[in-house]
Amino acid sequence: MLGLDGLEESVYRQILRTSGQRVRELTATLDAEESAVREAIGRLADMALIRRSWEDADLVLPISPEVAVGALLAGQEERLLRERQELERRRATLAQLVSEYATVGFVPGDNGVQRLKGIDAVRTRIEELVCRSTEEIVSFNPGTYEAQALEAGRSTDRSALERGVVLRGLYLDSVRNHPPMREHARWLTESGAEVRTIPVLPLPLLIFDRETALLPVNPVDRGAGALVVTGSGMLCALLALFERYWEEATPFGEDRQDALDGELSAGDRELLRLLGKGLTDEAAGRQLGVSQRTVRRRISDLTDQLGAGSRFQMGVLAGRRGWL
C-alpha cells in the first residue's frame, strides 16, 4: 500500500482503527521493537499520513486518508510530470543529434569507429577536421589529381598552415613526373608544409592532431565512403604505419639517388615485390601511380639488366641477387 513496508502499513492501519495511539501501545499491540516502531512513525509522518498530537507529544493521530493520499498522489504526479518533461527533452535532443549525424552521413559504430557514406560526407568531414586541427595533420596520398581539384583544396591547407598547424604529406615518387601534382607538392613545400615521396603507399590516410584518423572503406572505390577512427589502439597502429613510411621516404626537394651499378632502385624493388605477389601490370601500376606502359618499360629494363630471357627468369635472377 502506497509503497509502505510491512511494519509501516501495520502501524498506519492500527492508528486508523483506533483514531490515534501512543508509541508504547503500538509497540505492545504489534509486538515490535520500540525503535522500529518510532522509525515507522517517522516515515509515515514524512509521507503526511500521520501527525503527532499538539496536546500529547506521545500520541500519534491519523490524517484523513483522502487528504493524505491525495497529497501523496499529487506529489507523485508532479514528479512524474517532471520526469516526463525531462524524457521528452532528451528525446528531442536525441532526434536532433540523429538528424545532425544523418546530415554528414554518419553511421554510429563500435570501438571508436564511425562510417561516412558518400563522397560529399567525406569531404565535409575532412573540412571540419582540418578547421579544428591545432597541431598536426599527416597524410598518405597515393593517387593523382588534376590541377583544378588540387587548387580547390589549397584554401583549407593554407588556412591550417597560417594557424601554425604542421602538415606532413607522403606522395608517390610518380608525382615528380606528373605536372599538376609536382606543382602542388612544390606549392606545399614553399608554403611551409613537409612533403616526401616513396615508391608505394598502402592506402589513402589522414590523421588529425594524432586524435582522429580518416581512411577509405574501399581504397579503390572512393564512393564507398570512409571510416573515422578515434579508438586509441587503431589510431596508434595507423600513426606507427605513417611514421614508418615517413622515415623511408625522400623529401620532395631532393632527388632520389640513382641506384649504383648492380644495385636496384627503390621503385624497381617495389615493382618486383608487387609482381612477385601476383599483381598484374595494371594493378602494379595503380599501386605505384604509373601507367601500365611505364610498368612494362621498367620490366623490360629489369629483364635486360639481369640478362633474363623471360619474366619468370627475371624473377629467379632477381631473387638470387636478393632483390625480392
Image (tube, rainbow, N blue to C red):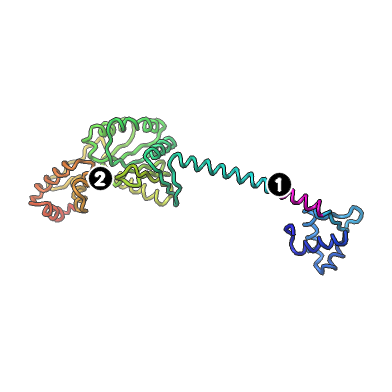
Asked which secondary structure carries label 2, the reply is: loop
Residue 266 as seen in the image, left or right of residue 107: left
Q: Where residue 105 appears, x then y in whole percent?
A: 43, 42
Q: Residues within 10 Å of mark 2 (few under 14, many from 20)?
A: many
Query: Which residue is nearer to you in this view: 167 or 8?
Result: 8
Residue that numbered label 2 is attached to: 200
Q: Where residue 41 appears, x then y in whole percent?
A: 80, 59
Residue that numbered label 1 is attached to: 78
Q: Residue at x 74, y 48 (%)?
A: 74
Tell whether position 216 is magenta.
no
Is the residue 128 above or below the residue 19 in the image?
above
- Residue 58 shows up from this direction: no
Of callouts 2 and 1, which one flags the residue occurring earlier in the amino acid sequence? 1
- Residue 178 shows up from this direction: yes
**Residue mark closest to the camera, 2 vs 1:** 1
Q: Residues within 10 Å of mark 1 (few under 14, many from 20)?
A: few
Disc 2 to disc 1, how far (Cα)? Answer: 67 Å
Amino acid type of disc 1? Glu
Asked which secondary structure carries label 1, the reply is: helix
Query: Which residue is nearer to you in this view: 252 or 126?
Result: 126
Q: Which image quarter: residue 149?
A: top left
Is the residue 41 above or below the residue 275 in the image?
below
Write down the region rendered in magenta: 65-76
